[in-house]
Amino acid sequence: MAKYIIRRLLSLIPTMFIIITLSFFLIRVAPGGPFSGEKGLPEQVQQNLLKKYHMDEPLFRQYLRYFGDVLIGNFGPSLRYKESSVNELIAQGFPNSIILGTVALALATFAGICVGILSALKQNRWQDYSAMSLAVIGISVPLFVIGPVLQLVFAMNLKWLPVSGWIFSRAGLKTLILPALTLAFPYFAYIARLSRASILEVLRSDYVRTARSKGLSEGIVIRRHVLKGALLPIVSYLGPAFAGIITGSIVVESIFFIPGIGKIFVQSALNRDYPLIMGEVIVYSLFLVTMNFLVDVLYGFLDPRIAYK
Amino acid sequence: MSLERNQVINEFNQQVKPVSLWADAWKRLRRNKMALIGLWIVAVFAVLTLMAPMLPIYSNTEQEMKHINLPPSFKNAGQVALETLQRKANQINAMIANEGRDDLKPELEKVMAEYELIKAEINVNPVHKRVYLMGTDYLGRDMLSRTIYGGRISMLIGFIGTITAVFIGIIIGAIAGYIGGRLDDFLMRFVDIMYGLPYMLVVIILMAMFRKEGQSSVIILFVAIAMVSWLTIARVVRGQIISLKNAEFVEAARSMGASSARIIFRHLLPNTLGVIIVFSTLSLPGFIMSESFLSFLGLGVSAPDASWGTLVSEGVQSMELFPWRLLVPACVMTIFLFAMNFLGDGLRDALDPQSKNRA
């Protein structure tokens, strides 16, 4: 097991290397530069600006320079937000994005598993049908439709919750409810369907029949035997769910005006703010591959049948 | 004794018609009501969008400045416009009377002037005889027509994206699965790494950097989405081919001198067709969602083209005052995605009854 974890950890290095290299060159081959958008900037000033940020050097040298900086954790200055460095911008936004993402994922997993259990135990009854219809809605309706519709109904018409804002404002934690619900809904739906299907499969298995024939109460059978086996597919779905939540948060943050890093991501790409895009991509990817790694390790602990060679 | 029994079995076998996989699947699909409804809805959408230029709808690009932001109605446009202006005038009047907002008086005069203008020509100008079933947008364009044409673009992107993904995925998956060995290791390692990439971020960067203002960016969108979408199908096809390539019928074909290409395309791939069809139906809504996601961020299809995503994002900006501009495209898009998902689920149950990864 320890050997597997180490090997798996080491495999993160080439992945991150490829991500950094690929995105660095992808961003640089695109037409246009960070200063070409500013009209009326004299040629000489543009040249000097490029020089200041070492962007007049050959591309490969810039790459080496950037790579060295990243290794010591320095993402460089932002080209657009001139008063702050990329590290500062990310340090400001990242906690907010993390709060939103974690709350949404926790909500999706918990509610999803609960609804999945309910559906499976009441298979083909009205509880099952209504829960699964809700799940199909969650899978079919895009985030950017759910978000505004929730805003329209609960914030603008019923006035129960604030339209936008963030938890540090006066409205406090109330501002978290709508964005977290929006972001959680599709993953809630998927986890509910997944857990229903896998619980139904486990319920038919031999070891559950054995547990029941031993005379265990239904509650214990479900908690000790069924859930343990049925949770595995959900754990392996958590990896893709993390990726989805990261991209989803870009939209949710801009719908609800949340000061996270998703909101500035699109803008930084449009502005050709090279260091900022790179910094965001690296932070997102690092987060994602770490989460995938944790999921894999967790999976190994939960499923003793997996032999790590 | 045993000879006699064999004869009986033979006779029995001749009476029973063989049922092909497809006939069997069709029979199962027909029993699934939700999937059938889904199939019908998808068919209706396909016909409507394909025949859009022939339908008796108003232009989706022509702007009618006298009909801005009209609500959905069965009445003539002139009538609706008059009512809308009347309501607006009443609101302004109330504000002037109650809150003493005298600064709104020029606004009121403008509204009344427009009211008189439309009233004067309501029976003369044929434009006012139009009926906007789904209302109009901020440039006086028919929402119904815009939604249908938006569906054309969204569905086209979904369709082309799926075909490209399936095409690349089949080729890579088949090669990796059939040849195996080092090549397989290399290809699958590559797929693993690509899986680790936050691919939507890459697409966002691609779209933000390579699109040019005022130029339709549909092609870049295709490339961006297709580049990262073949991974799953490649894995699925590879798995299927590995499990089949040592089967007796493949050995038989090989012993008769069939080439590798012939074995792959004539014997192995047809056996994976069910999985591929299911995957395609389930990924098409995914592509439509990705496209509209980008369009919502302002990175997808650009004007004059409009997809469902563009329409929704335009609608969001004014949803408080003109909710139909959000709700019409959002509902239509949701119904289509709904139908596709039900159809995909039904197809999976029909083509792959023992499927382990149902969800």
Image (cartoon, rainbow, N blue to C red):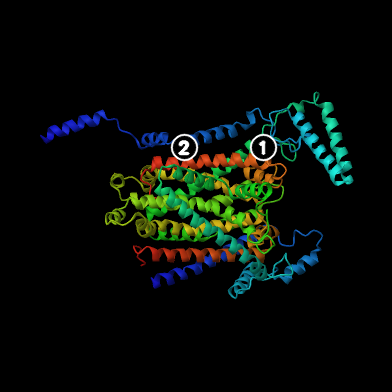
- Which residue is situated farthest in the top direction here? B123
Residue A233 image position (x, y, % from top left): 42, 56
Instruction: Give neighbour class at mark 2: few <14, some 14-19, many 20+ (Cα, 10 Å).
Output: some
Q: Nearer the viewer, residue B69 or B14?
A: B69
* Mark 1 / mark 2, whichever is N-terminal: 2
Total tally of numbered discs in the picture = 2
Front one among A207 and B223: A207
Image-based side of B294 in relation to B107, left or right? left
Write down the quadrant of residue B75 in the picture: top right
Task: Inspect the image, locate mark 2, and give the three-letter code of the amino acid beneath it.
Answer: Met
Foreground disc of the pair 1, 2: 2
Q: Chain of mark 1?
A: B
> Looking at the rendering, in which quadrant would you find the N terminus of chain A?
bottom left
The part of the image, by quadrant, that contains residue B51 is top right
What is the distance, in whole Å, between disc 1 and disc 2 at their CAs? 28 Å
Discs 1 and 2 carry the same chain letter: yes
Question: Pointer 1: residues within 10 angstroms few (<14), some, or many (20+)?
Answer: many
Relative to A267, B5 lies left or right: left
Query: Badge 2 sits on which subunit?
Result: B
* Picture coordinates of residue B231, whole percent (x, y): 48, 53
Image quarter in which the C terminus of chain A is found: bottom left
Residue B34: assigned label: 2
In the rendered structure, which amino acid carries the disc numbered 1?
A: Arg
At x 70%, y 62%, the residue is A170
Residue B359 in view: no
Q: Any mark on residue B146, and which?
A: 1
* Residue B278: mark: none
Residue at point 47%, 68% (across, down): A11
Q: Secondary structure at mark 1?
A: helix
Residue A199 position (above or below residue A71): above
